Image (cartoon, coloured by chain):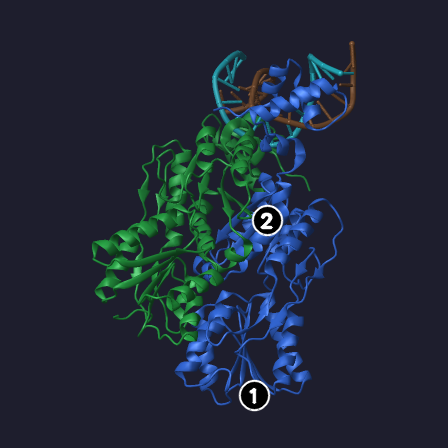
Chain colours: A blue, B green, C cyan, D brown
Amino acid sequence: VKRPTIHDIARAAGISTSAVSLVLNDQPGVSAATRTRVLDLARSLGWHPSAAARALRGGGAGTVGLVVARPASLLGTEPYFMQLVAGIEEELGPRHISLVLHVIGPDSDAEPAVYPRWWSQGRVDGVFLVDLRRNDPRLPVLAGLGMPALVLSRPQSARLPALWVDDAAAMRRVVDRLAELGHRRIAHVAGLPDLVQTTQRRYAFTRRARARGLTDTTTVTTDYSAESGQAATRRLLTGPRRPTAIVYDNDVMAVASLRIARELGIRVPAELSLVAWDDSALCRYVEPALTAVQVDVSGFGTAAARTLLAVIAGTEVDSRPYRTPALVERASTAPA
Amino acid sequence: VKRPTIHDIARAAGISTSAVSLVLNDQPGVSAATRTRVLDLARSLGWHPSAAARALRGGGAGTVGLVVARPASLLGTEPYFMQLVAGIEEELGPRHISLVLHVIGPDSDAEPAVYPRWWSQGRVDGVFLVDLRRNDPRLPVLAGLGMPALVLSRPQSARLPALWVDDAAAMRRVVDRLAELGHRRIAHVAGLPDLVQTTQRRYAFTRRARARGLTDTTTVTTDYSAESGQAATRRLLTGPRRPTAIVYDNDVMAVASLRIARELGIRVPAELSLVAWDDSALCRYVEPALTAVQVDVSGFGTAAARTLLAVIAGTEVDSRPYRTPALVERASTAPA
DNA sequence: CTGAAAGCGCTTACAG
DNA sequence: CTGAAAGCGCTTACAG
């Protein structure tokens, strides 16, 4: 079970390997008859160019990489990454470019080390960077390597090209809508405090609320888990100045918190409005169905892949926001 | 920004590339002093072996592949794949083996073509096969190529090694428990009819029910979507011989069907018991929380990765079931 | 229109 | 203890 090479084709066709190579790369300099013979032989032998040989000659790896540093448990509950990957593949698949995925623990120092290794090994031609943190150590590493990369958050500095979901704009819509509904005391149950995404949502939340005259706002941070969301919710709802509306940074926390409200005898949406971030089956099928910020994750992934390929090709790419998410209103929000 | 090679190290150390290679591969034949010098230089230059050069010399690609043929929308709702990938990575990551992931449409004829290409390109050293179907066209393709592969379902024939979650055993537990609770008319809302997994659950369901004297059973198949699960549930609950218990082949359908029962004024669990397959946040946080078949997907992925690496290494591997899933009882099941 | 040669980065017998 | 050479599969100037 040996893999066919251009040598096998050359021998079968009775010509040199260079002639075979010219045909297979659609270069001129070979007669039509020979061309046909070679193409037929390649097909019948099931020949495909050796990825290793091509890469060694400088053709690139034909792959892009994605490192995800989250615990396995969270990955299961958050549909985000799988949808992102599916969207990325929509662009890569037809071009026969592969996605190399690496999942590591959340507290691992290993991530910054992955990039020098991948780059030095020539394993990938470029990478996506997710879950950007403040003073993210990966940024200088990638910039130092000169490795093509696309940041999938809005970066604070512009060392690397970026494409991001406009969380700030979405948050302003949410606050506007809640204000319209008459809510005056609103809270934000945010995600991991280190993530740039969290800072940006939080900032937009507070700022927009102020701008609309809502000064009684709170933000608490969590680790995105259902349990931490529930704990934060319980504190908010049993505290001195109970909010009439809560915005959650993912769907799992919002859904899990419905139970807390019920336990405490607080009716949703009559006494409390809830908004989830990242729409999913979870939001649609709980009772009451949750109002949610709906991000087109898969489309975002496709756009990201297209952009990263441009970066790899050496095109100058402008950092820019992707489409602003929609706010889908369901049964969990009502007038205050 | 050029990547360092052993030539750079050799030049810096003033020795030959072969000596460098011996050091970097921990082979004898080099003085301790030279060894230290070389290792220090490699570290300071950030050298890592070229994946392409190693692969070309016959060292293998250092990657394994996984093709997922499901629509992006379903991938988002089903945590299964991401958990599987996380589990796989737990084994691969420390060994610096990468996972090449390919997501394609569900109706694509492209999947069987991926394997010859990957193999001929030398892109992966082996692959996982998921969502096995009856007379699956991928089996003869892989066997013909002599490509290392691990089937993650229970195959009907033994052409390739396999590791699977024992769905049949889990289904027997579910039926036993429902029978103990006094249910006599039970239904099974299954997944895609073409999947071997569906056939096996269905068969186990019917057979065990018979064995316990329950002859009034129905199985209907779906496409795993919330909508198809709801439609099936509506038909069952408004039909002539209404079941008192329904087993669903995933969690999304079970959760979505809670709403149908509510609409029809059928109380869960007083008048209808529901069991979900694949436990998730969804099941835990809806009201009532769903009784579910809890599969250790991440652990399964880790075991699968270990097994595939053994297959690639040429070890004779026995096909075998992985741990039988547990039945976690929550508030959606009660005496008939 | 076609072939021989060099080289991508690495490893491994083989000489010395 | 160390170096020169060959070869993995491919592409690309360079000869003819």
Above/below status of B198 relative to A29: below
Q: Is disc 2 placed on a helix, strand or loop?
A: helix
Q: Is disc 1 placed on a helix, strand or loop?
A: loop
Quadrant of the drawing holding the N terminus of chain B = top right
Number of numbered labels in the structure image = 2
Query: Is residue A133 found left or right of B185 in the rendered image?
Result: right
Residue sitting at 70 percent across and 24 percent down?
A: A23
Other-residue count near label 1 (Cα within 10 Å), few / some / many at <14 / 14–19 / ≥20:
some
Query: Is residue B322 found left or right of C14 in the rendered image?
Result: left
The residue under label 1 is which amino acid type?
Answer: Ala
Residue sitting at 28 percent across and 71 percent down?
A: B334
Subunit bearing disc 2 = A
**The label number, if any, that marks residue A336 in the structure image:** 1
Q: Using the image as rendered, state which of residue B185 and residue B149 is in the foreground.
A: B185
Subunit bearing disc 1 = A
The residue under label 2 is which amino acid type?
Answer: Glu
Q: Which residue is mark 2?
A: A89
Question: In this view of the protein, can residue B203 be seen by the observer?
Answer: yes
Q: Position of residue B276 (x, y in %)?
A: 37, 62
Q: Using the image as rendered, state which of residue A68 and residue B194 is in the foreground.
A: B194
